[in-house]
Image (cartoon, coloured by chain):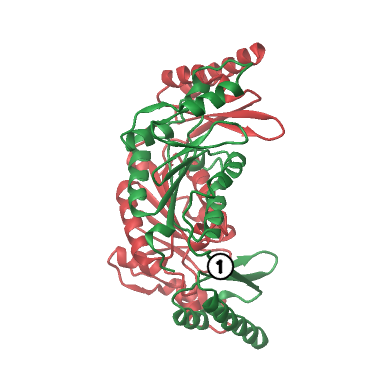
Chain colours: A red, B green
Amino acid sequence: MNLKKEFTAAIVIIGNEILSGRTVDKNTSTISLWLGEKGISVEEVRIVPDKENIIIETVNYLRCKFGYVFTTGGIGPTHDDITSESISKMFNQKYVYHPEAYQILEKYYENQDFNEGRKKMAKMPEKAKLIPNPKTFAAGFYFENVFVLPGVPSILDAMLPNLDNLIFSGKKILSISIDTPLRESSIAKELEIIQNKFNDIDIGSYPYFKEKPGTILVMRSVNKKNLSLCEKEVRLLVKNSLSNS
Amino acid sequence: MNLKKEFTAAIVIIGNEILSGRTVDKNTSTISLWLGEKGISVEEVRIVPDKENIIIETVNYLRCKFGYVFTTGGIGPTHDDITSESISKMFNQKYVYHPEAYQILEKYYENQDFNEGRKKMAKMPEKAKLIPNPKTFAAGFYFENVFVLPGVPSILDAMLPNLDNLIFSGKKILSISIDTPLRESSIAKELEIIQNKFNDIDIGSYPYFKEKPGTILVMRSVNKKNLSLCEKEVRLLVKNSLSNS
């Protein structure tokens, strides 16, 4: 698939805990599946440490190259949460309290100490717009084509629906999977011939080795008609190969 | 932590199935934890599609910037497996059958059709060295500081021990985690004061929201003595904050 820039996105996962291996990143999958439903294809993901110059360089490059950039992580109350300030600098925007974000937090912490760390979660680029957080009330934000989201998966999951109307949708990316006990190496050549026939379809072949080995064949495209034709050919290949094996 | 270049690494995850969200990448965590034991710190991860120019550009940039690059994915028998050929081009090496890799596969497929796709798994840069695969026999390879591994997690897991003697080890990166029911926002300021005292320690604060909310505080360093001093201060902070809350 070759999609126009406005239907492409990149994800930047910010956080030493992912790089160190302590935590497995689940947000990439969540965001990618959600975007796929809207016809937006994630073309690159980068996982970077909590370092200001790297965050700025990475997000700046990707926001020029792709239609959307989604960041996760680094918008909490502690010293290692530096995403909002970095993005403010990148956009040459003042890093200030967002009045509405501040009010929401002030109310939430009504009976507790509304300390510096908690207030910090209301700071963002001056002209940023809020992404409401129905779960823990510390908002995310967006500015131009950059969407800044939290790292905790359950909070991110709860916030994504608030973005549904902000993403300019393309044609939904359709996907068909066929799970077969065939080894992928037994059908590699024939599969390539089918791939070469359908240049607007991505055919992927993913072997697995559980109790028994097998392969999942995945076809992805925005072209429903061709996808259906391609599926028929792949199913026929699988059927014939199974009866020959 | 600021480590010398030779103790740093990057990982390149190659595969449309990760970008589309269909599959959650587990290899980053596996490789990072294994490298951490050897004192090698993963500084960046990129997830890229099965596209030759992007693979070449990405790996080439990262192999100059960091001590090691590990790639996963794209070394199987099908048309979408283009990593080995891309890496050959990047190194300006012929993309040829590796005699030993070929022999291993020929023997493995003794009683089956040793077809083009299966032979392809023995192709790699002319002067590459093998990384044996005790599980499915299709080898990985390395050339200079680039290590090319498969995408299937169980196969990658089985191959990593074969690299143990090839990685120039630094001081093991030590890690201490403290799990506390405190909200991170209640100790943000005090934690920053401790972080500022210990500049060779990375203190990370990771909130969670399960049945009850809490925070995991992680300290990482190669300096055992300072890590122990830092741990004492963080434990005292947690203890005092819990008795005040």
- Inspect this view and state whether residue A225 appears: yes
Residue at 44% in and 80% down: B196
**Is residue A48 positioned above or below A94 on the image?**
above
In the picture, residue B227 is in which quadrant? Answer: bottom right
Q: Position of residue A184 (x, y in %)?
A: 57, 25
Total marks placed: 1
- How packed is label 1: few (under 14 Cα within 10 Å), some, or many (20 or more)? some
Judging depth in this view, the residue of B226 and A187 nearest the camera is B226
As helix, strand or loop, the secondary structure at mark 1 comes to strand
Residue at 54% in and 74% down: B224
Q: Position of residue A170 (x, y in %)?
A: 41, 38
Residue position marked by numbered label 1 in the rendering: B174
**Is residue B130 positioned above or below B112 on the image?**
below
Q: Position of residue B17 (x, y in %)?
A: 51, 38
- Inspect this view and state whether residue A107 appears: no
Relative to residue B105, is residue A4 drawn left or right? Answer: left
In the picture, residue A91 is in which quadrant? Answer: bottom left
Residue at 56% in and 59% down: B37
Residue at the outermost right position: A211
